[in-house]
Amino acid sequence: MSEQVSRHDDIAGEASMNRERELATAFVGLADTYAPDFGPLRLFDRLVHTCRSLLDVDAAAVMVADARGTLKTMAATEDEAAFIELMQMQVGRGPCMDCCRTGEGRSVPDIAGEQERWPQLVAAMADAGYRSLHAVPVRLHDRALGALTLLNARTGDLQGGDHHVAQALADSAAWG
């Protein structure tokens, strides 16, 4: 019995070390502004794909304001995720828009419960197969530059410390 527990602890410890390595690599990748292929689009593409691979999410997208303050989708892991952001920008309403305005994260663990508040968003998410949305501010110090959108096909909140990891990744991208 103690041998089984020991093996389980070894596997859990190895998984933890792998995640730590992946996180370290992700932060270095987001901070490397001297890379030959560096550019804002590449940076935000790296951000959304890193979030999808490291966090328990099905899709990710990021919107950022340009110099005139107009929000634009900079990258998305799926076309449907980009559409969810575009739809919110067009109507000027939704959790991502709230996140951009306030600089505070928004979590919608079950989008179906928001039918009255955001009917277009609920319909678009249902059509795309997403059931929950989490918006994390992309911010430089205290100034919100945009929002990182995390989408799941299941209901529920982000797992464990994933919200904090997503915020740290978004902040790192903003600094880049």
Image (spheres, grey):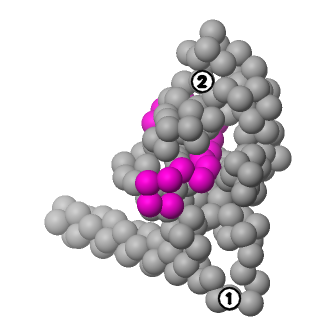
Quadrant of the drawing holding the C terminus: bottom right
Residue 148 is left or right of residue 86, and the answer is left
Nearest the eye: 143 or 126: 143
- Residue 15: tell me if it is visible: yes
The image shows residue 151 at horizontal and vertical percentages of 62, 41
Of residues 6 and 114, the one nearer the viewer is: 114
Q: Does the magenta run of residues contain 151?
A: yes
Task: Say which amino acid is labelled 2.
Answer: Ile
Task: Say which residue label 1 marks.
Answer: 35
Is residue 107 found left or right of 72 in the rendered image? left
Q: Which residue is mark 2?
A: 111
**Residue extending furthest toward the top:** 116
- What residue lies at 54% left-to-right and 24% top-to-bottom? 110
Q: Secondary structure at mark 2?
A: helix
Principal secondary structure, stretch drawn in magenta:
strand
Q: Is residue 87 above or below residue 40?
A: above
> Looking at the picture, how far across and down is residue 145, in whole percent?
59, 53
Instruction: Residue at 68%, 53% (x, y): give it.
Output: 64
Which residues lie in the magenta part? 140-157
Q: Earlier in the sequence, mark 1 or mark 2?
A: 1
The residue carrying pointer 2 sits among few (fewer than 14), some (14 to 19) or many (20 or more) residues within 10 Å by Cα, namely many
**Residue 98: x percent and y percent?**
56, 33
Image height of 14 relative to 82, above or below: below
Q: Are marks 1 and 2 in contact (CB under 8 Å)?
A: no
Question: Which percent across, then down, holds residue 108?
Answer: 52, 29
Residue 61 in view of the camera: no
